[in-house]
Image (tube, grey):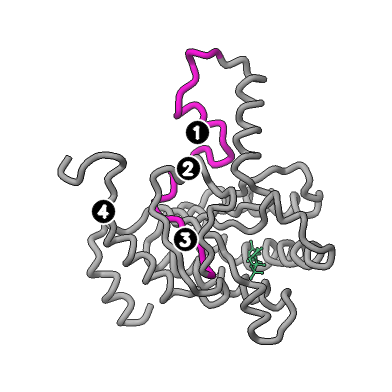
Amino acid sequence: MSADMSEALSTIPPERIPRHIAIIMDGNGRWAAQRGLPRMAGHQQGVTNLREVINACLEFGIKYLTVFAFSTENWGRPEYELKGLKQIFLDTFQKEFQEISKHGVKILHIGQREGLGDDILNCIDYAVENSKNNSDLVFTVAINYGSRNEIKHAVKKIIADGIQEDQISEELIGSYLFTNGVPDPDMVVRTSGEMRLSNFLLWQSAYSEWVFSKTYWPDYGRGELLKSIQEYAGRDRRFGKLTSQ
Ligand code: FPP
């Protein structure tokens, strides 16, 4: 970390550093178009940047990072892009994520397994198994994820398990979501200037602070992440109560 950045971080009280950061990585296509490059070049640069952000989280002492890589709605993209993204996910799980698991990162997947090919599922399962004893940073990748789909799965499972009406609580519902075991995000970032939730962690982000950055994902590196953390640190989180309570 540069001296400037570590100084900026040291001015933030530790309890104001988010424990869990979730990110909607948006703007790869526009980043590429701006440079006259094919969309895939943007996604490729998105992977390079993801590595930088994971390393920044390790350096900054962030405990949980969740990223939205592919939504249940993204299947509507053109065939060439779906093929390209699939190859990028396979390569990233086999190379980058193998590497980060050597550095204390525990990898998790959220999203519907059905619909993802065996090749992707095998890569995901291997990365999860291979990193399960790590604990410096819990890194969750959302692939084939949508919040409404997640809630539908949870309701079906609750019924299949024969859960009775008087047993239904917010905690129980949370435990049936794909994110079971991971605390709710403190801060959710969306890059590229879009200001939509896009079906991401709807239940879990009920009290998260949203931070919107105009920067396209491939350029949202360490410095940008630090700026978002500073913005978060300046927020007054009340959880529906009053500041003085
Ligand atoms: C948004 O750009 C990004 C995606 C649809 C997801 C792909 C993400 C990556 C390749 C980053 C690396 C992640 C992993 C897990 C390997 P966009 O295509 O929506 O951009 P646009 O809105 O500018 O067209």
Give the label on residue 4, or none: none
Cα distance, mark 3 to mark 4? Answer: 17 Å
Q: Nearer the viewer, residue 68 or 122?
A: 68
3 and 4 marks in contact (CB < 8 Å): no
Q: Secondary structure at mark 4?
A: loop
1 and 2 marks in contact (CB < 8 Å): yes
Mark 2 and mark 4 lie on one chain; the one further toward the N terminus is: 2
Q: What amino acid is labelled 3 in the image? A: Val
Residue tagged 4: 236
Q: Residues within 10 Å of mark 1 (few under 14, many from 20)?
A: some
Q: Residue at x 39, y 45 (%)?
A: 207
Q: Secondary structure at mark 3?
A: strand
Residue tagged 3: 189
In the image: residue 186, left or right of residue 48? left
Q: What amino acid is labelled 2 in the image? A: Gln
Residue tagged 2: 204
Cα distance, mark 1 to mark 4? Answer: 25 Å
Q: What amino acid is labelled 4 in the image? A: Asp
Q: Secondary structure at mark 2?
A: loop
Give the label on residue 174, or none: 1
Q: Quick check: is 237 in the magenta stretch? A: no
| x and y, in percent, of residue 28 in the image | 63, 72
Instruction: Say if disc 1 is inside 8 Å of ligand 1.
Output: no
